[in-house]
Image: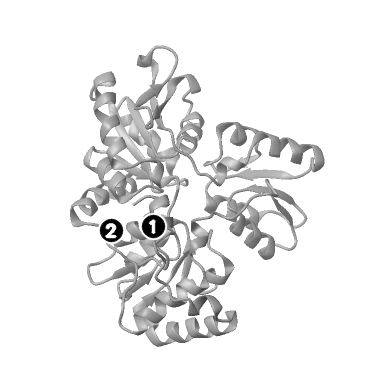
Amino acid sequence: MNVLEMMKQHDDMPQDYKTMSVGEMEARVRAIKEKFGERLFIPGHHYQKDEVIQFADATGDSLQLAQVAAKNDRAEYIVFCGVHFMAETADILTGDHQKVILPDMRAGCSMADMADLAQVERAWPILQELFGDTILPLTYVNSTAAIKAFVGCHGGATVTSSNAEKMVAWALTQKERIFFLPDQHLGRNTAYKLGIGLDEMAVWNPLTDSLEYKGDVKRIKVILWKGHCSVHENFTVKTIEYIRQTKPDMNIIVHPECSWEVVQQSDYAGSTKYIIETIRNAPAGSKWAIGTEMNLVNRLIQQHPDKEIISLNPYMCPCLTMNRIDLPHLLWALESLEQGKIVNQITVPSSIAKDAVQALERMLAHA
């Protein structure tokens, strides 16, 4: 199910939750958390709203949270405050006795949905005919379980923004070429950092089932899926130029889901964890323009009043689909559990989970 389909879904949450006061909702969530104790675990992604993240038992990136949930085998219910692919990964990694719940099924990821299995299965034989058995697929963890399973079945692995460099380097020891899904920017930025030229990278367009490349295809080392993060694409060279002109002493730090041009003109680039740690360790009085999701930027501003922190793009909005998870939906999911009902359970079929686990395990073995 893609983001558009999710957003069209009927939201079964009763209207009463939308008229309840914040104070009452917060009190009810706290009471349920206390009642369930270790039987309930709430992971919260860094991009979640403060109204939700305040109740998270752990905060982090998508894979980190899924791994923490898997280690917490005492938890019967994992109410994942993130997006659909994150809850899928949690379901893949957790035990059969654990149930993963997404408070709002409309919380998807546009980047993950830019690569669906049918498109990849059309692309693969065309690429095999062009290049033979010289390609290893890699997929960003920001992808559907079906894509992870395809990659796992074909000998490939998942990557995170933290370990992408290590994984691409590993993949190129296995095969002559890599096929990187679904975020072209992370793939391009990572490959370039490893010394692969832009002229050695091609883009696969799933809408036209064609390779976008000028020159001798034999030179291609990296095939990038034409996908992107709609949030990080909104940071542009123009926004950097404006900061350089108006605040020349400000450091610019961005996520590698930003375009190659933006990463090249920034002072620092790295994963969400890298950004958080860099700001935390920066000296008091330092100045930072951050190119990542707005909820996280605002949280960093609140956490570090001794530093001047702004968004690289002041007109940015928080991630639309991530923000589907709000306090009313969290409370609804929890009160449903209290009443013996499970709403919005995420279940990955065992046939898909088996191959997806291979991709995840290869990453953990080599990263």
**Image quarter for residue 78?**
bottom left
> Of callouts 2 and 1, which one flags the residue occurring earlier in the amino acid sequence?
1
Whole-percent x and y of residue 331?
Answer: 46, 77
**Image quarter for residue 332?**
bottom left
Residue 182 in sight from this viewpoint: yes
Q: Nearer the viewer, residue 327 or 294?
A: 327
Q: Mark 2–mark 1 contact, CB under 8 Å? A: no
Amino acid type assigned to the residue bearing label 1 in the image = His
Whole-percent x and y of residue 71?
Answer: 33, 67
Q: Distance between the residues labelled 2 and 1?
A: 12 Å
Indicate left or right for 336 with 327 as reference.
left
Q: Name which residue lies at 32% across and 24% down.
A: 176
Q: Check disc 1 and report the residue beneath it.
A: 84
Amino acid type assigned to the residue bearing label 2 in the image = Ile
Outermost residue, left direction?
A: 351
Q: Is residue 73 above or below residue 116?
A: below
Q: Nearer the viewer, residue 343 or 304?
A: 343
Q: Check disc 2 and report the residue beneath it.
A: 92
Q: In this view, does 237 lie above or below 350?
A: above
